[in-house]
Structure formats: structure tokens, C-alpha cells
Amino acid sequence: MTTDPTTSVLDTLNTDESRRDFLVKFASGVFAGLVAPAVLGGVTNIHAAPPPQAPGLAPVPEVPPAFAGEDPIIRMMQDLRRALQKPMEQRRWSMIVDLRKCVGCQGCTIACITENKLPPGVVYRPVITETRGAFPHPTRRFVPRPCMQCDNPPCVPVCPVNATYKRPDGIIAIDYDVCIGCRYCITACPYSARVFDRGFFYNDLDGGAREPFELLPSPEYRENLVRAQGGSPIGNARKCHFCIHRIENGELPACIVSCMGRAGFFGDANDSSSLVSELIGQPNVMRLKEEMGTEPKVYYLV
Ligand code: SF4
């Protein structure tokens, strides 16, 4: 492959040899990025419903030398399982998005919708497109925006029935059985991270039948609720919960494993040897609306 910086990627693929090189590297990348974590790490498919409670976590197998150091998913899984050995109150689950790597494909948004069986109008992890600069040098940046799992969450004290609360590991959860749908928390969140479930289904407008996945139970909070039966979480506030049901099963959140650019990172920031601790220590890290004192646990590399 040429090293001339003025040559475009397409130009570099103009010879048989280069095309072969590219295809080999692409195939290796797909294996390392998508297949290896699922096979080597013992991760269940993100579409599969998790078992109710894992009695014990299988160790993460050694990575074959060909892939060692290539995929942060393997390291994050090892970090995750190490964190699960500690008492819950000693974990500090944190997420990092490398904005330099995010290409705005919205794969994480779709993975989250699929994982949590989200209905129309309910999105936990939108990817916001930010346009910066002006002609002739405008640039675009893509910012995934899950719930920030704030250490000082403005959404919690406004709840009149204590339906939303901070868990010992720092995740902000919602008890759907207690939530009365007043929506105070939706107004209080400075990140617009909460949405109201209005009870829509995908084929409502044309009077069609429920889609098969709408009849499946959602693994959220391990409650296995089926919206099609008419009860919660219809009429409740909803939001990202870092896929509690997955991480407590030794699996990374759906948005992290689905990111084809490996722009997402997850782990225990209380563990100084974890990958997230390493990244949070970088000088180019930032958080959204830090001036509000919410202490978000979602960080961005810029
Ligand atoms: Fe609450 Fe919003 Fe902070 Fe999430 S981002 S914890 S919903 S205030």
C-alpha cells in the first residue's frame, strides 16, 4: 500500500495486490471485532435473552496471539469480571466514547433498541450530530448520548414516589412498579436522557399486528416485562441503565460490543488497572455540562 498522504483510499485499492491486502485486513478486523469477542469471550449474542442469574462466570479465555492487543473488548471483559468479584458498592461503572472514532453509524442506537425491545419514540442512546465551524471549513462530529449515570443526579430528588434511585454501584435505576409517570424526572434531566413510554407500537399507524419482537419480554432490570400485555413500562419514564442485566452477567453493554469502530469503552473506574481508568486519565477527556455539578460517569475523548 502506498504511503503517499495525498493518495486517496480508493486510489490505494487500485491494484490487485492492494485489494487483496485490504480484503485480508478487513476480514481480520471483522473477526477480531465481532466474532472473536463472542466466541472467545463466551459472550452471548446481543439479541439473546440473558439467563436469569449466572451461578458463576466462566473465565475469559486467553486471546490467540494473532489477536492479542488488537481488540479492547477482550480486556474490558476481563476488567468487568474482575470488578464483579468485588462488593457492589466498590464498583464505579463508567463509560467512555472516543469521539474521534465514532462515525455516526448509529449501530449502538439500534443495538440498544434491539436489546431492550424499545418501542417507537423511546431511544436510550441517540447519536447526536454536531456541526462545527463555518464555510469553507465546516466539520461534523457524532456524539452518542446515553444516560450519564450522574453521581449527583437531578432526576432522583424530584421523584415524588422514590421510583428512581442510585444503586450502590452508581447506576441510576427506575422501579417501573413504583413509577407513576409524572415525568418530573424527564424535565429535571439536563441531558434529556429520559423519555416517556407513551404506549406506541410499530404498526399502530396502519393498524397492523404487533411485530414478533414486540411480544418478547425485555430483559431490563431482569423484570422480563412484556409491553404488549399493556402494563409497565408503558406510562413510565425510561432511560439507559448501562445494560445492568448484561454486566451482572459478565457481559458488556450492548452499545459497547456493537460499535464497529470500537469507539465505546466500559468498565470499573474504581479499578486503577482497568482500561476505563487508563482512558479517564488522558488529558483529552471531557464530560458534558460539567459546570452543573452532576458528576456524569460518561466521559468523552476528544
Ligand atoms: Fe438522571 Fe439525566 Fe443524570 Fe441520567 S443523565 S442520571 S437521567 S439527570
Image (cartoon, helix red, strand yellow):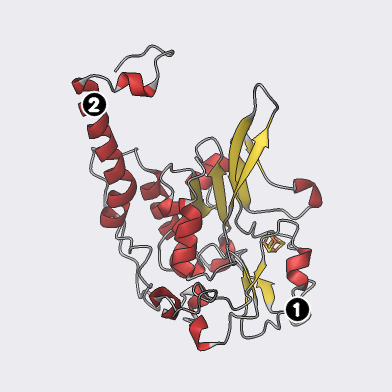
Q: Secondary structure at mark 2?
A: helix
Q: Quick one: which residue is furthest to the front in this view?
A: 206
Q: Nearer the viewer, mark 1 or mark 2?
A: 2
Query: Would you place residue 102 above or below residue 202 in this image?
Result: above
Which of the pair 79/47 is nearer the observer?
A: 47
Residue under the image location 38 percent in, 72 percent down? 50
Q: Are marks 1 and 2 in contact (CB under 8 Å)?
A: no
Residue under the image location 75 percent in, 47 percent down? 290
Query: Would you place residue 39 above or below residue 10 in this image?
Result: below
**What residue is shown with label 1?**
182
User: Percent from the top left, x then y, of residue 60?
Assistant: 31, 56
Does mark 1 have its CB less than 8 Å from ligand 1? Answer: no
Ligand 1 lies in which image quarter? bottom right
User: Percent from the top left, x then y, of residue 159?
Assistant: 76, 76
User: Percent from the top left, x then y, of residue 141?
Assistant: 60, 37
- Tell me the quarter of the image containing the N terminus: top left
Which of the marked residues, 1 or 2, is nearer the chain's N terminus?
Answer: 2
Q: Is residue 264 visible?
A: yes
Q: Secondary structure at mark 1?
A: loop
**What residue is shown with label 2?**
19
Residue under the image location 75 percent in, 48 percent down? 289
Query: Would you place residue 277 above or below residue 86 in this image?
Result: above
Q: CA distance from mark 1 to mark 2?
A: 58 Å
Q: Amino acid at mark 2?
A: Arg
| Quarter of the image where one finds residue 239 | bottom right
Residue under the image location 80 percent in, 51 percent down? 292
Residue 108 horizontal side relative to residue 295, left or right: left
